Amino acid sequence: DALRGAQEIINAGYIYVVDLDLERFFDTVNHSKLIEILSRTIKDGRVVSLIHKYLRSGVMNKGLFETSEEGTPQGGPLSPLLSNIMLNELDNELERRGLPFVRYADDSMIFCKSKRAARRVKESITR
């Protein structure tokens, strides 16, 4: 779907791309921000609390328990869903700006018609 979407955008004349790959995204998701976003939509506090417990449950690394202060458990069943919820904020911002884009998990391509526009988008999105 992302590839088809990208092809359609390119065919519409958007030939410059800002390639966005959020480094260590799953490892660095801010729990407080995610819980804030979830609380706006999920009205049952028990569900939000359960997700928060899941995020803080920790992981086993080479046989040793490690607490988890940030990030979502890689390979965990909720992690892809939670990442999409978190990155929906980015999607909304790009849509608000009228920028065509495609996203797959934490990888995005933002399309522009000029090199100058692509540079501006890169600088503003990085901030």
Image (cartoon, rainbow, N blue to C red):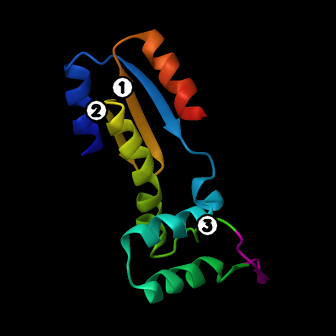
- Residue 50 appears in the rendering: yes
Mark 1 and mark 3 lie on one chain; the one further toward the N terminus is 3
In the image, which is nearer the foreground, mark 1 or mark 3?
A: 3
SS at mark 3 in the image: helix
Q: Give whichever of 29, 11 is nearer the camera.
A: 29
**Of helix, strand and loop, which one carries label 2?**
helix
Q: Name the residue under label 2.
A: 6
- Mark 1 against mark 2, which lies toward the viewer? 1
Which stretch did the figure color magenta?
61-69
Quadrant for the C terminus in the image: top right
Residue type highlighted by circle 2: Ala
Comes first in the chain, label 2 or label 3: 2
* Residue 113 in the image, given as x and y percentages of width and height: 33, 14
Q: Position of residue 36 (x, y in %)?
A: 52, 66
Q: Which amino acid does label 3 sit on?
A: Ser
Q: Are marks 2 and 3 in contact (CB under 8 Å)?
A: no
Badge number at residue 111: 1
Residue 28 included in the magenta stretch of the image: no
From the image, tell me which residue sits under label 3. 32
What's the CA distance linking mark 1 and mark 3?
Answer: 31 Å
Secondary structure of the residue carrying numbered label 1: strand
Residue 105 appears in the picture as rendered: no
Q: Residues within 10 Å of mark 2 (few under 14, many from 20)?
A: many
Please tell me which of labels 1 and 2 falls first in the chain. Answer: 2
Q: In which quarter of the image is residue 29?
A: bottom right
Residue placed most toward the observer, 119 or 124 = 124
- Residue at position x 79%, y 82% in the image: 64
Query: What percent of the width, then of the height, locates residue 23?
Result: 62, 46
Within 10 Å of the Cα at label 3, are there few (<14), some (14-19), or many (20+) other Cα atoms? Answer: few
Q: Is residue 63 magenta?
A: yes
For label 1, the crowd category at 10 Å Cα-Cα, with few meaning under 14, some 14 to 19 and many 20 or more, is many
